[in-house]
Image (cartoon, rainbow, N blue to C red):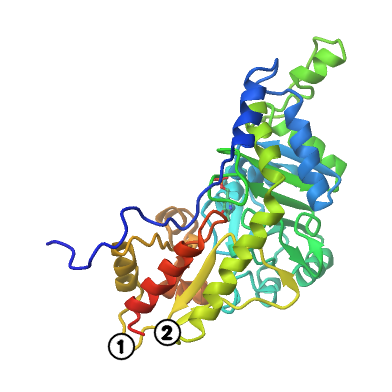
Amino acid sequence: MKQAYKVIRPTTIPYGRQWIDEDDIQAVVDTLRSDWLTTGPKVPEFEQAVADYVGSEYAVAVNSGTAALHAAMYAVGVGPGDEVIVPPMTFVTTANCIVFQGGTPVFTDVNPDNLLIDPAKIEEKITSKTKAIIAVDYAGHPCDYDALRHIADKNGIHLIADACHALGAKYKNKMVGFLADMTAFSFHPVKHITTGEGGMVVTDDAKFAERMQRFRNHGITRDHHQRRSQGTWSYEMVDLGYNYRITDIQCALGKSQLDKLAGWIKRRRQIARRYDEAFTKIPAIEPLRVKPDVYHAYHLYVCQIHPTPLNADRDVILKKLHAERIGVNIHYIPVHLHPFYQNNFSTKPGLCPAAEKAYECLISLPIFPKMTDQDINTVISSIKEVFNT
Ligand SMILES: *Cc1c(COP(=O)(O)O)cnc(C)c1O
């Protein structure tokens, strides 16, 4: 059967996308013409630039956000038998990185207001096997780091931030990247800045940084560049690592993108304000709550849709908006509901009721710095139409 809805735009407004300028392209081209395509000078330059931006001592760049989380799990020594506390309202890789190391993810429910891990539910999940908490700054809203730090210190476990949504966000005026023992970022094209694929872990701990540098390079103690500058050919593989290295080409792009980050977050916040204003008049659509003590980086703009007699449920609304060429999306299917986790870790529906209930009515609206005012108006007017207001 043909779609009954009219098509109003030739192309879809996506939920997120990159912004590449001529100077980004030039930075990549310059690197292509240089001596180093990988393990060259652009990698530490980009690492230093991100460390300076977030105020951390060390930064270790890798070739995806997933590799960043995996490296952090390796650095804290997660292994078979260990448990790591993780929220279900995230991308699968936040839990997968624990499994890569042989550990067990312990899914802990979220606060229904903002879908961030609920500190009040963590302590009951801590056992003698608990090694760490991974906090996810879902949508770009920093977690309650004071509460998380308190729990981590009291129980002698590590606090890791999956801040793949939250580069540039602040909690009580402190930058994300500065609040956990290690903080992971992603540079996938939908994230705040991009290197195509890429990721980074920032930390103030020299030991963690050193372990991650080794982990990204096969578990070898010295990389090619260091060997050359130190005039030695010898190297030792001291542990099992991976090739998680990022290229200089990517780091040149990342460094060029980073210069624009602050302005891009401002634009994301402006778009969010426009949505907030528009939806105060539509009771069926409720944006997630934002705490007053954070600077939200708005990787995602997430609302909950409350079905009323006048409008249909979330999935029908999603279809209608897609027909209007509005690229709305769902973030996320709670991770513990995926077959892999149900089959291998015996997770079941009912384990995290707040996340499961929220998932039924979540929707992410388009938000990215290159969105025009016209795009924003189009999204708002399509939503008004779909909700019959
Ligand atoms: C994007 C993302 C990651 C990392 O993804 P990569 O595609 O591997 O860079 C991790 N956690 C969350 C919450 C993410 O959104």
Residue at 32% x, 58% y: name it.
9
Q: Amino acid at mark 1?
A: Leu
Q: Position of residue 12 (x, y in %)?
A: 36, 55
Kindly identify which numbered label has been placed on residue 284: 2
Circle 1 residue: 310
Label 1 vs label 2: CA separation? 9 Å
Image side of residue 284 versus residue 293, left or right: left
Q: Which of 347/97 is in front?
A: 97
Residue at 50% x, 79% y: name it.
278
Mark 1 vs 2: CB contact within 8 A: yes
Image side of residue 186 versus residue 159, left or right: left
The correct choice, above or below, for 52 with respect to 335 in the image is above
The answer to whether residue 247 is seen in the rendering is: no
Q: Position of residue 200 (x, y in %)?
A: 69, 43
SS type, badge 2: loop
Residue ranking furthest to the front: 374
Q: Position of residue 107 (x, y in %)?
A: 57, 64
In the picture, residue 4 is in which quadrant? bottom left
Q: Is mark 1 within 8 Å of ligand 1?
A: no
Q: Position of residue 197 (x, y in %)?
A: 56, 38
The correct choice, above or below, for 25 with respect to 167 in the image is above
